[in-house]
Structures are given as structure tokens and as C-alpha cells.
Image: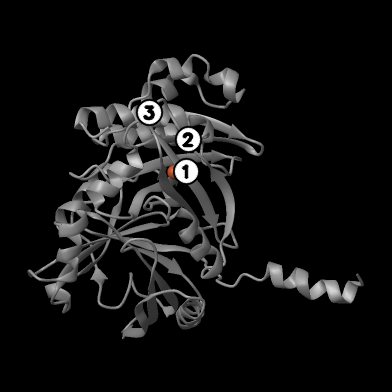
Amino acid sequence: MNHLTQEPKVQAQDVDIMPINGTDYIELYVSNSKQAAYYYKTAFGFQSLAYAGLETGVKDRESYVIIQDKIRLVFSSPLHSGSDIGRHIDAHGDGVKINALWVEDATKAYNDAISRGARSYMEPKVEEDKDGRVVRSGIYTYGEVIHMFIERKDYNGTFLPGYEKWAPRYEAESTGLKFVDHMVGNVELGDMNKWVKFYEDVMGFKQILSFDDNDISTEFTALMSKVMSNGNGRIKFPINEPAEGLKKSQVDEYLEFYEGAGVQHVALNTDNIIETVTALRDRGVEFLNIPSTYYDTLLDRVGEIDEDLEPLKDLGILVDRDDEGYLLQIFTKTVNPRPTMFFEIIQRKGATSFGKGNFKALFEAIEREQELRGTL
Ligand code: FE2
């Protein structure tokens, strides 16, 4: 094959059909946005950023935006009965509604996504205030979760039009959380490949990893997972589905209590996991307990690491190695009354994977929690 005919094909493969700069924000629908914002500030070390509600001319909801380095979380609650937010909370409990993606052109992102088969949530909408102009649009992904496309290159305000700066007297100290590393979705049995295809076809993502029930299973439970990544690797969405096991898997438990597919966990990156997790634990964040025997053979499994073993063991931090380096990770207990959503704290030292070597220890820890709930 001559060079000239080959070249366009190579270029076509390299074109990112959905350029995304990064995660813009994650919005949760919760029953009490004011108290949720206070909890995440106090326990997780976020700072106050912006507010929308009756005082800013918003009539139907109250939203608080908090920030820690590049992570922005929004908590929204309805002000009246009969709202879509209220219906969402009644169906799912508190949970992630919006994963917002920062793009250069929210109109093009939307039109392209729709032309490739996405379901519309919100047509491109221009919103302006004294600080400039923002374009937002939105599409559905699994369950009732939305991807909003946010175009903010002509905006200098605190967060978005409709929001005002929120600067209360109380602020909590940072715990060293830096950015959203990945966000995991749980989908119904048999649906994983459908959503893999959605991220490939509609969003131009590539599958970078896959785990089957041989990788992710314990004596009792199993699940399957595929990890989707966007072109520049800043957005990573693992998608889980339950697999047949002797007992109910954590994904089944999630689907039952969330009443459908949704966001299972958000992983937040730190560059010093020992300091971050020490601070989080001191402030009341509860983590899964890992048996001390995990650490007896840890260094045999992962080789030499920079960290002392003792604090890792004391905090229950897991370690795994891949071809490129190693990672340290830990998982909170579920953060809501329903056993649905939780957070991961992760530090990467070269590793780009997701801790496959820890799955067994992790899932056994989750099973001990399920046992206490009687949901295994
Ligand atoms: Fe994770």
C-alpha cells in the first residue's frame, strides 16, 4: 500500500471526535443541599464557591457549589414538591445527576453527540450575566445520569450565570484532594456492552481495560467491568455490570437500592494519600476496613514502594502495581442512607490502571458491610 493512501486512514483514527478539556463539575441531587455542602466541606476539605437560590433569583431549587483544587461539586435540592429533582431523590435517594464536561464548543459537542445517537437532555442554551457568557447543553447516559457540555471560554464569573459567590465565615482546610481521577457507573445485567458502545460511538471514547468475573470475583460475588477513556485520557469511566455469583453482588445491591443504573463511585486524586486519608479519617470520613493480613504479603506482591508500610496498614490503604508503576487507593463506606454511592481516594505513582490486584480484598471488605446490612 502506498504512503498516500495510507495516511488519511491513520489520521482518521487519531481524530478526537469529542474533544474534552476535563471534568467541569459533578452535580448531586440531594435532599438537603445546605447540609450536604457543609458535610463535604467539613469532612472532605472542600471550600465554598458559589450559591444559587431564592436570593439569586432561582425559584425552584437551592444549589451550593464547593471546590477543592480542580474538583467542583454541586449539591441541589428542590424548594417545592412535584419537582423533577424531588422525583429523582424519591426514586434514587441522594446521588450523582450530572457529570459536566468542559468543552470548547458546547453546541458542536451536542449536535455531534445527537447525530451519533445520543438522547437529548437539554438543547444548547446560552446564559449570560455581567461576567460573560456560558453555553450549556446536555445528553443522557446510563440510568438518569446526564453529561452536560459546558463552554466557558467567554466567562469570567465564579461558577455559572445564576450563581453568586458564596463566601461564608466558616471554611474548612483542604485535605489535599486534587482532581477527579475517574467516575464509575453501575448498569443493569447485560447492559455493559451497550454503554461501552455508547461511549465509543457517541463520545469517541476507547476501551482501555476490561475485567471479567475471573478477575473480579470472591467466593460469593462477581462483576464485570470495562474502562472507557476519552481522547486525551483526562476522562475515565469504568462501567460495571453484575455477574452470576453465589450471592448478591455489590452491583446488584446498588441497582436494587438506587432503583436502576447510576454512579457508583467517584475517585478523587491526591498526591499524598497518607496525609489526605489521615485528615479525612480525623474528620469523620469512614473507610472500608482491610484485614491486617493483606499487608503481610503486600511487598511480595507489589515490590518496593516509597511509603512506609505502617501508616498504610493503619489507614487501610491498598497498593497495586502495573507495567507503568504503582497506585495507592482506599474506598469510603457508602455515604448515603441507601447503600449506593461511595468515594475512592487514589494516588498514582506511574500506574494508569485501577487496582485489579486489590479487587479480591476490596470486594471481601464490601461483602462484610453487605453482611451487616443483610443484603448479601
Ligand atoms: Fe475506582
SS at circle 1 = strand
Q: Quadrant of ligand 1?
A: top left
| Residue furthest out toward the right | 2
Q: What residue does disc 3 label? A: 220
SS at circle 2 = loop
Determine if residue 197 is in view: yes
Amino acid type of the residue that numbered disc 2 sits on in the rendered structure? Ile
Between the C-alphas of marks 2 and 3, the distance is 11 Å
Amino acid type of the residue that numbered disc 3 sits on in the rendered structure? Phe
Between the C-alphas of marks 2 and 1, the distance is 7 Å
Q: What residue does disc 1 label? A: 224
Q: Quadrant of residue 315?
A: top left
Across and down, in percent, residue 313 comes to: 42, 21
Residue situated in front as seen by the camera: 348 or 261: 261
Q: What residue does disc 2 label? A: 216
Residue at 17% across, 77% down:
58
Residue at 32% across, 35% down:
279
Residues tagged 2 and 1 counted as in contact (Cβ below 8 A):
yes
Q: Residues within 10 Å of mark 2 (few under 14, many from 20)?
A: many
Q: Residues within 10 Å of mark 3 (few under 14, many from 20)?
A: some
| Residue furthest out toward the left | 81
Q: Is residue 318 above or below residue 233?
A: above
